[in-house]
Image (spheres, coloured by chain):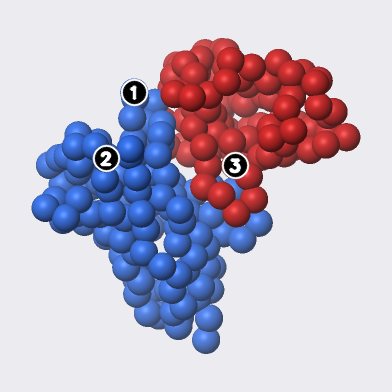
Amino acid sequence: EIVLTQSPATLSLSPGERATLSCRASQSVATYLTWYQQKPGQAPRLLIYDASKRATGIPARFSGSGSGTDFTLTISSLEPEDFAVYYCQQRSNWPSFGPGTKVDIK
Amino acid sequence: QVQLVQSGAEVKKPGASVKVSCKASGYTFTNNAIHWVRQAPGQGLEWMGWINAGNGDTKYSQKFQDRVTITRDTPASTVYMELSSLRSEDTAVYYCGRGVSSSWALDYWGQGTLVTVSS
């Protein structure tokens, strides 16, 4: 079973700052890595799939990179609506999610 | 537009079963898998299983293997997830999601169904 670790657990930033979120897999997942955003009381929202492809309608300030075991989600300049929890997800023999990174307002 | 609409909240007693529906619209139902993910209060996301809406093939998490059944009604464009032998730890919001890409990303999600298990 592949385990995903996300860091940091919480990221406290101000609007306009750059956010860098990390997701590490316990073994290679190639580029089968997805990022979601979730706000309280809402379903997750797809941001990035196949490690670096932005989903339809996702602003260009969101970008994903990485392959193998190390992945990064970058938000180039935080907007007020970006403060949320971010999950990574992998698919190998069985899909799983990381524990999440909460991005909150400093 | 693509939509997944789930059935309403449920309250069940321990030992009972629950069946949650997920009605798809706005795309060709048989072209995508439908996955089920749950989220306990204040916790992260947990994958339960999925169904290939085209051929009906299913795959379940080992954790739920003996208790979960996912089925589909193709003419109704609806997928069902039934969880049996409920316990308090099954209290969660249950989501369906449409699978896309080689990463099995979920691009559209239902609104979620809260299942509360309480005596």
Closest to the camera, between mark 1 and mark 3, is 3
Q: Residues within 10 Å of mark 3 (few under 14, many from 20)?
A: some
- Of the 4 image quadrants, the one containing the N terminus of chain B is top left
Residue B81 visible? The answer is no
Residue depicted at x 69% and y 35%: A81
Q: Which chain is red?
A: A
Whole-number angstrom distance, CA of label 3 to CA of label 2 = 23 Å
Chain B rendered in what hue? blue
Label 3 residue SS? strand
Per the image, the residue denoted by label 2 is: B26
**Label 3: chain letter:** A
Instruction: Give coordinates of residue B68: x percent, y percent.
Output: 32, 61
Q: Which mark is residue B102?
A: 1
| Chain of the residue where label 1 is placed in the rendered structure | B
Q: What's the amino acid at mark 3?
A: Gln
Q: Comparing marks 3 and 2, which lies closer to the viewer?
A: 2
User: Is residue A9 toward the left or the right of residue B26 in the image?
Assistant: right
Nearer-the-camera pick, A77 or B31: A77
Quadrant position of residue A3: top right
Q: How many numbered discs, if any?
A: 3
Q: Disc 1 marks which amino acid?
A: Ser
Q: Amino acid at mark 2?
A: Gly
SS label for mark 2: loop
Quote the CA–CA distance across marks 1 and 2.
22 Å
Q: Are marks 1 and 2 on the same chain?
A: yes
Q: Which mark is residue A80?
A: none
Q: Is residue B114 above or below residue B86?
A: above
User: Which residue in the protein does label 3 denote?
Assistant: A38
In the depicted view, which residue is nearer to us: B26 or B38? B26
